[in-house]
Image (tube, rainbow, N blue to C red):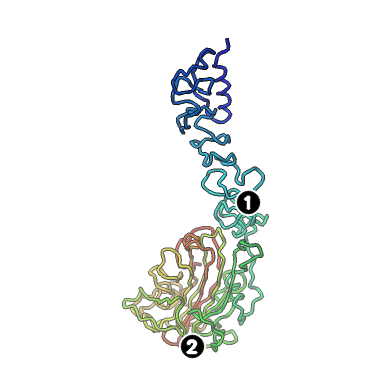
C-alpha cells in the first residue's frame, strides 16, 4: 500500500535543495489524507505538510529560525527567493535571488558592473568590483590598483627596495630607488624646483593626470619662494641672495645625498669662497615679515624666556607635496649656523630656523617639526648647539662636544653651529587628519633686527614606511 510518507519524502527532498530538511514523522495512510487530524483547517490533500501540528499549514506565516516549514512551501525558515539562503542565514533581501551572502557584486559573475545593490550582504554596496576601492587606499582596480586588498599597494605608493613587492603597480618589482637629481644645479638658481631637488625631492607630481577622479602619483606638486609669513618676495631687494645651492658649506658640511645641498640664510647663503658672500656679522637686507602660520617661537631652555623679536631678512621655501600612500614618516638632515652665539643667547635678538608642516601632526601644539628634546625651536638657545667653544653664556652651559672645526671657512668662525641633525616627522594620513597632501615650509630669519645672521644647510629628504620615532636628534 502506498502511504503519504513518500509524498512527504519527495517534499522534503525539494526542501533540501534550498535549505535545511523539513521536519516530518507523519505516517498517515491514504484513508487519512482527507482528514484534518490537527484541526487547523487543512488536510494532507489540501497541502498540510504536518497534519499533527496545528501551527503548520499553507495558511501559516513562516517564522524564522525555528527550523520548521511553517507554511508548507517546501522551504524551512523560508528562502523566499530560492537563492539557497533564508533571512536567518544572512540573506539581506530574500525577495531578490541575486542577493545573498557571498553573492558576486554587480548581480552576476563576470559582469563587474555596479548595480547599486549590496549583493553579498556585507553591508557595502558594489564592493569587490574593479570600480570600488576595497582597501581604502584611494585607488580602484580601474585606476591601476594591482592589489586592492592591500592599502600599501597602488599607483600612489612608493616602491620599497628588496621586498619583492611591486608597491607602485608599475609592473617592476623593487625599483624604488630614485636617482639623485641635483648634479647639474647652479648655485644662484632662483627656481624653487631646483631648491627642492637640492634637498632630495626628485619626484614631481601633478594634480590631474587626465583620468576623472584619479589621483596621480606621489611627489612635489608645487614649489615657491616666499617670505616666512607666506607673502610674495618678488618686490623684496636682496631676497634671492638668501638661498643657494652648494656642494658644501665649509669643508666639513658636505652634501648628504646627491651632489649638492640647499642653504638658506638671513644673510647671504654663501661661504667666503663663493661669489656673493657677505659677512654675517652685519649684513642686513632691510626687510621684515611675519612668522609662518602666526607661529610665535619660545625658548623653554632659557631661565627667563625672552620676548621674541619680529622677523627680519627671512627666506623660506614652500613645497606642496603628495605623500606616498604607504609612507608613515619622512626625515631630513640640517646643520644650523648662528652668529648670535655667544652674545645674544636668551635675548630678543635670536635667529630661527623652522620646518613647518600643514596640517599639523597629531599630538603637536604648533606646526614646527624641528625642535630639541626640551621643545626649543632651532635657534641660538636650543640644546643641540654643539659646534662651539665650551662656555657658559646667557645662563646656559654649552659643552660643545663637536669642537669648532666645522666652523672653518664658513664665515661663522668663533661662533656656533648644531652639527648635522635629523628631523623625523609622521607622514601617516591618520596622524595628518586623513589627508595625503601636505604643505612644507623651510625658513630662516633674523629676530629683532637684520644684524648678526644665521644660516642653515638642508639635505637628504627621505620617505619611510616606518613610523616616526622622534623629532630632531644628532646624526653622523
How packed mark 2 is, by other alpha carbons closer than 10 Å (few <14, some 14-19, many 20 or more), is some
Q: Say which quarter of the image contains residue 85.
A: top right
**Left or right placement of residue 89 versus residue 198 in this view:** left
Camera-side residue of 31 and 73: 31
Q: Position of residue 314 (x, y in %)?
A: 49, 82
Q: Residue at image x 58%, y 26%?
A: 14
**Left or right placement of residue 301 versus residue 7 in this view:** left
Camera-side residue of 317 and 87: 87
**Left or right placement of residue 305 versus residue 29 in this view:** left
Q: Position of residue 138 (x, y in %)?
A: 57, 58
**Above or below — where is 143 with respect to 187?**
above
Q: Position of residue 250 (x, y in %)?
A: 55, 79
Task: Check residue 130 in the rendering and tell me which mark sits there, or answer none.
Answer: 1
**Above or below — where is 60 with respect to 146?**
above
Task: Check residue 287 in the rendering and tell me which mark sits there, or answer none.
Answer: 2
Q: Quadrant of the N terminus?
A: top right
How far separated are the C-alphas under marks 2 and 1?
A: 56 Å
Q: Is residue 164 visible?
A: no
Amino acid at each position: 500500500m502506498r502511504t503519504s510518507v513518500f509524498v512527504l519524502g519527495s517534499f522534503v527532498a525539494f526542501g533540501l535543495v534550498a535549505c535545511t530538511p523539513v521536519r516530518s514523522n507523519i505516517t498517515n495512510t491514504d484513508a487519512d489524507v482527507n482528514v484534518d487530524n490537527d484541526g487547523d483547517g487543512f488536510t494532507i490533500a489540501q497541502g498540510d505538510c504536518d497534519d499533527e501540528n496545528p501551527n503548520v499549514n499553507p495558511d501559516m506565516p513562516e517564522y524564522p529560525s525555528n527550523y520548521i516549514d511553517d507554511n508548507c512551501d517546501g522551504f524551512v525558515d523560508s528562502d523566499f527567493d530560492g537563492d539557497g539562503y533564508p533571512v536567518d542565514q544572512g540573506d539581506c533581501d530574500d525577495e531578490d535571488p541575486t542577493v545573498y551572502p557571498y553573492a558576486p557584486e554587480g548581480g552576476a559573475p563576470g559582469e563587474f558592473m555596479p548595480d547599486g545593490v549590496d549583493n553579498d550582504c556585507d553591508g557595502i554596496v558594489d564592493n569587490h568590483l574593479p570600480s570600488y576601492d576595497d582597501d581604502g587606499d584611494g585607488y580602484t582596480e580601474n585606476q591601476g590598483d594591482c592589489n586592492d586588498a592591500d592599502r600599501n599597494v597602488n599607483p600612489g605608493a612608493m616602491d620599497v627596495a628588496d621586498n619583492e613587492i611591486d608597491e607602485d603597480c608599475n609592473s617592476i618589482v623593487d625599483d624604488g630607488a630614485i636617482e639623485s637629481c641635483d648634479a647639474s644645479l647652479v648655485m644662484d638658481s632662483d627656481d624653487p624646483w631646483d631648491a627642492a631637488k637640492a634637498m632630495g625631492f626628485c619626484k614631481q607630481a601633478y594634480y590631474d593626470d587626465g583620468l576623472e577622479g584619479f589621483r596621480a602619483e606621489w611627489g612635489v606638486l608645487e614649489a615657491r619662494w616666499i617670505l616666512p609669513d607666506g607673502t610674495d618676495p618678488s618686490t623684496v631687494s636682496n631676497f634671492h641672495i638668501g638661498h643657494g645651492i652648494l656642494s658644501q658649506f665649509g669643508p666639513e658640511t658636505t652634501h648628504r645625498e646627491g651632489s649638492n645641498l640647499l642653504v638658506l640664510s638671513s644673510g647671504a647663503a654663501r661661504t667666503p669662497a663663493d661669489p656673493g658672500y657677505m659677512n654675517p656679522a652685519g649684513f642686513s637686507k632691510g626687510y621684515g615679515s611675519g612668522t609662518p602660520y602666526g607661529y610665535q617661537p619660545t625658548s623653554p631652555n632659557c631661565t627667563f624666556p625672552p620676548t621674541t623679536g619680529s622677523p627680519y631678512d627671512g627666506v623660506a621655501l614652500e613645497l606642496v607635496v603628495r605623500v606616498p600612500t604607504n609612507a608613515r614618516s619622512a626625515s631630513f638632515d640640517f646643520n644650523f649656523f648662528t652668529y648670535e652665539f655667544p652674545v645674544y643667547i636668551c635675548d630678543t635678538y635670536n635667529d630661527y630656523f623652522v620646518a613647518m608642516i600643514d596640517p599639523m601632526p597629531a599630538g603637536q601644539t604648533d606646526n614646527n617639526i624641528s625642535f630639541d628634546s626640551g621643545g626649543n625651536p632651532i635657534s641660538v638657545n636650543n640644546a643641540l648647539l654643539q659646534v662651539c667653544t665650551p662656555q657658559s653664556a646667557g645662563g646656559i652651559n654649552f659643552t660643545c662636544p663637536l669642537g669648532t672645526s666645522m666652523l672653518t671657512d664658513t664665515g661663522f668662525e668663533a661662533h656656533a653651529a648644531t652639527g648635522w641633525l635629523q628631523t623625523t616627522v609622521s607622514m601617516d594620513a591618520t596622524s595628518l587628519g586623513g589627508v595625503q597632501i601636505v604643505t612644507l615650509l623651510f625658513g630662516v630669519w633674523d629676530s629683532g633686527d637684520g644684524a648678526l645672521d644665521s644660516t642653515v644647510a638642508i639635505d637628504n629628504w627621505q620617505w619611510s614606511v616606518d613610523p616616526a620615532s622622534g623629532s630632531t636628534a644628532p646624526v653622523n
